[in-house]
Amino acid sequence: MPSIEEFGIEPVPAELRTTGWRDLFAINFTFFLNPVMYVLGALAVVAGGLPLWWAVAAMVTGQALAFAMLTVVAQPGVDYGLPGQVAMRSHLGFWGARLLSSPYRVVASTYWFAAQALTAGLGAQAIYEAMTGDRLPLVPLALAFAVVHATFAVLGFDVMRWLLRGVLPVSLAFTGVLIALYLTTDNPRYAVSRVFDSPDQHLTWTGFATYVTVMCGASLTFVTNVADFCRYTPTRRDMRIGLITSALASAAVTTFVGGYAAAATGETNPFVAVADLTSSNVLLVAFLVAIVVQGLAANITNVYTAGLSLVNSVPRLGRVWATIVAAMAAVTLSAFPDFVNHAQRWITHLGNLAAPLTGVILADYLFVKRQRIDVEGLFDPQGPYRYLNGVNVAALLAVGVGACAYYAVPPSWVKVVWGVGVGSAVYLSIVVAVRLAASLFPSSRRRSARCGRSRRPAS
């Protein structure tokens, strides 16, 4: 049995980085194989109007775009054993990360937590009604799930890794049985030829581009914390294999499962479809258990990252207490069904900041920092990442401009690409302009170092 994690925001020693790509695959695949992802797959068909296979293509494309960027951002976790929010200090400034990106990640994590708890509640509600004819109230169900999920998250990474190893086969079994029900039912709406043809849906570029953005934006909300999962990983190769293969496989599977039910019935809640496909109480109970454990797997990760973000802002809390505080906030949000009823809208808002923030981080890490970070400087408020009073003003300006671009362009332009591209371009332009000014006016050199860049980290 694993022990409670002791590490907070300090680097994990190299000798403890033993989580290979298989464990990382299990963590990430199990995280994405969750009830909310099924609903997003269904929305791509119902709200996006995409035929099933085009829905799968859109979601996998969005996931591929996201993880092409996230695997780069995750490198400081592998290289130095750093949690993501501490690495953010090199890009946003010592106080910029603690007071801006960390609170953003807490908000994003608690949103995803509430959406998972509510979706699990909807699934349990539908299955219980099919078994008994009675309808349980949603909010108490969601809160009950939320409390259980939050309790496990407090225990830390080792417990999360150990638990998710057990959850993975249950999730795969649930998915396999669900697909088997789709393929073997006598209901003509579920006929393979009909669903694959998707006669009620028609491909449009706007629908495809919208759900590329939805999927990519949803995953990019992890940009400040993706390194959290990789700071126990020994090599970049393990990280890339584990993250990319799991992300693409899970996007394909969940979109197929949710989209198949949506193409057959028009329902955005695939669990309603499950209840209609079988009258076996044994099977329905098994599905209920699977919904519980899938939501648990995702929400352990959500609260774990929220806790690390909060302890970066308030180190004196320590990881355990920070996770408890984040868990309490997440449980509270689980009482508001709007978070899942209007999931696409909320994800769009979160992606509005995640996309330009990702662009700024990539530009700074790859082209300004040259993939090098001064680890000791990350913990020194007067060190190389002080910028202007602890805040990288150039980064914040670029994120703001990128966010405006994200909202300004239409969905058919693939909003997430514009958010990332404009954020990175504006940031590099400001850095180049400040450096040019510093070279022309040497007296402004100190000011430029604080406003536009940090001291070059030691290799």
Image (cartoon, grey):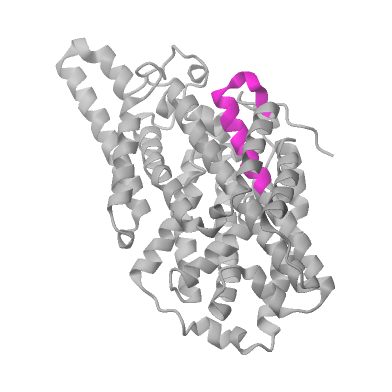
Closer-to-camera residue (321/301)? 321
The secondary structure that dominates the magenta segment is helix
Closer-to-camera residue (18/386)? 386
> Is 291 above or below relative to 107?
below
Q: Report how many numbered discs are placed on residues in the image.
A: 0
19 left or right, relative to 363: right
Closer-to-camera residue (32/367)? 32
Closer-to-camera residue (85/230)? 85
**Position in image of residue 320 (x %, y %):** 70, 28
> Is 114 above or below relative to 58?
above
**Position in image of residue 445 (x %, y %):** 24, 14
**Position in image of residue 225 (x %, y %):** 54, 38
226 left or right, relative to 136: left
Is residue 233 visible from the viewing direction of this image? no
Quadrant holding the N terminus: top right
Q: Which segment is the magenta one?
A: 299-319
Is residue 337 visible from the viewing direction of this image? yes
Q: Residue at x 73, y 66 (%)?
A: 135
219 left or right, relative to 202: right
Q: Residue at x 61, y 70 (%)?
A: 257
247 left or right, relative to 406: right
Per the image, is 305 magenta? yes
Q: Residue at x 62, y 70 (%)?
A: 270
Per the image, is 46 magenta? no
**Position in image of residue 106 (x %, y %):** 55, 36
Q: Residue furthest left?
A: 440
Q: Quadrant of residue 453?
A: top left
> Is 264 above or below relative to 431?
below
